[in-house]
Amino acid sequence: MTTAQTPELDVQPTPLALLLLGREADPRSERGVDCPGDLPSPSDPDLVERARAAKVKLGDKVFVLGHHYQRDEVIQFADVTGDSFKLARDAAARPEAEYIVFCGVHFMAESADILTSDDQKVVLPDLAAGCSMADMATAEQVAECWDVLTEAGVAEQVVPVSYMNSSADIKAFTGKHGGLICTSSNAKRALDWAFEQGEKVLFLPDQHLGRNTAVRDMGMSLEDCVVYNPHKPGGGVTVEQLRAAKMILWRGHCSVHGRFSLDSVNDVRARIPGVNVLVHPECKHEVVAAADYVGSTEYIIKTLEAAPAGSKWAIGTELNLVRRLANRFASEDKEIVFLDKTVCFCSTMNRIDLPHLVWTLESLAEGTLVNRIEVDKETEAFAKLALERMLALP
């Protein structure tokens, strides 16, 4: 038995592969790049005092935003807390602040830069704090998808609707092609508007929010939805499917909310009789269908605030927030548990820790601008157009 000689294959790694291996850097990617500078040690007992002192020194020059999913050690220094869009708008409402320190992830800082003035500088404490969902749709992939829709003869009927959890590039594509941005709380209004403009919607990048809004809130069927997979030729869908679909869903998801399963819901109901299941609409359709309440992060917080004493809740969202809410409402005898048995933080959001925040604040206090997030003017213009269409919704 003989073995034929196999010539060496000249395989060139893709830019994405090099990025994942840590051998390249892409500042436009949600995967981010290395953080420059020497960070203080996490074991430094003076970190809290150092952060406080630097913030006092900066005074009104700095405005710190803290996303709900941040660690408690970071949230304590936030001037305001909220979801991504609320925080971006809060930043725009503080024109006197020279520095906007966004304790969140990359796309959130981009949105803040788009909405704030040119004089304000948006800073992300760790450039590697990205969003896996936002990374699931690149500008090149979406442009290729549009070519597929054009070849299928449906592009003129399609209005893009992009979730806030997307890169500035995707927001700009959306604005350029007549679409708008949505949040998890106004997705239905955004889709109502889109269907007034066209016959179909390309929903980016979270398939679950798109599907849940279309089916649960707008009365469509699952058959009205088709999933476009950017990793398959032609998106893995036929021309006939594209022509028949009302909702063309991008194959993206949240790595945290996508973990929750129907088994999680059934298990918590068996363990805690009378429990109310409250989940985020980024969860899978079967989880949303089995839940008692579904809504955005702000909706989850307000629902628990209004809940009666003694009520029991299983929450399907990021663990930092669930734990914070459980502690907050413990004195009101509200039992609040995480929906899944497996602990799951948002790993990229958790890259923003106290050492990174201290390094950022101390650098700014010394007059050194670090980790600035800046969107180029053309991208900003089209992305802002998409955001302004959302803001104009009734």
Image (tube, rainbow, N blue to C red):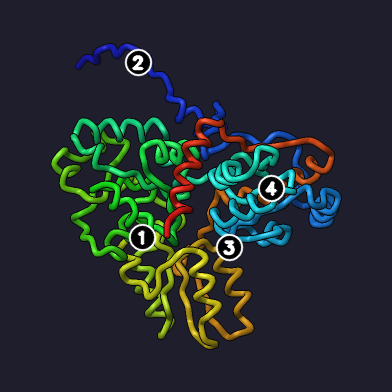
Say which mark, if any, is on residue 188: 1
Q: What's the CA distance linking mark 4 and mark 1?
A: 31 Å
Give, as a three-letter code, the residue at label 4: Val
**x%, y% of residue 2?**
22, 14
Q: Is 366 in front, or is 120?
A: 120
Q: Is 305 left, or right, of 59 in this rendering? A: left
Amino acid of disc 2 = Leu
At mark 4, the secondary structure is: strand
N-terminal label among 1 and 3: 1
Work out how far the residue at label 1 is from the one at label 2, CA to CA, in angstroms.
50 Å
- Residue placed under numbered mark 3 in the picture: 320
Kindly identify the residue that appears in the image at 76 percent across and 44 percent down: 359
Measure how far apart labels 3 and 4 are at the Cα level: 20 Å
Of the two numbered discs 1 and 2 in the rendering, the one whose residue sits closer to the viewer: 1
- Disc 4 versus disc 1: nearer the observer: 1
Q: Is residue 383 left or right of residue 240?
A: right
Question: Going from the N terminus, do you reach mark 1 or mark 2 first?
Answer: 2
Which of the labelled discs sits on residue 101, or is there none? Answer: 4
Which residue matches tag 2? Answer: 9
Mark 4: few, some, or many residues within 10 Å (few <14, many ≥20)?
Answer: many
Q: Is residue 80 visible?
A: yes
Closer to the camera, 347 or 95? 95
Residue 137's x, y, as percent?
40, 39
Report the residue that reaches farthest toward the left.
240
* Quadrant of the drawing holding the N terminus: top left
Q: Report x, y in % for residue 101.
A: 69, 47
Q: For the C terminus, give its image quadrant.
A: bottom left
Q: Earlier in the sequence, mark 3 or mark 4?
A: 4
Q: What's the CA distance linking mark 2 and mark 3?
A: 47 Å
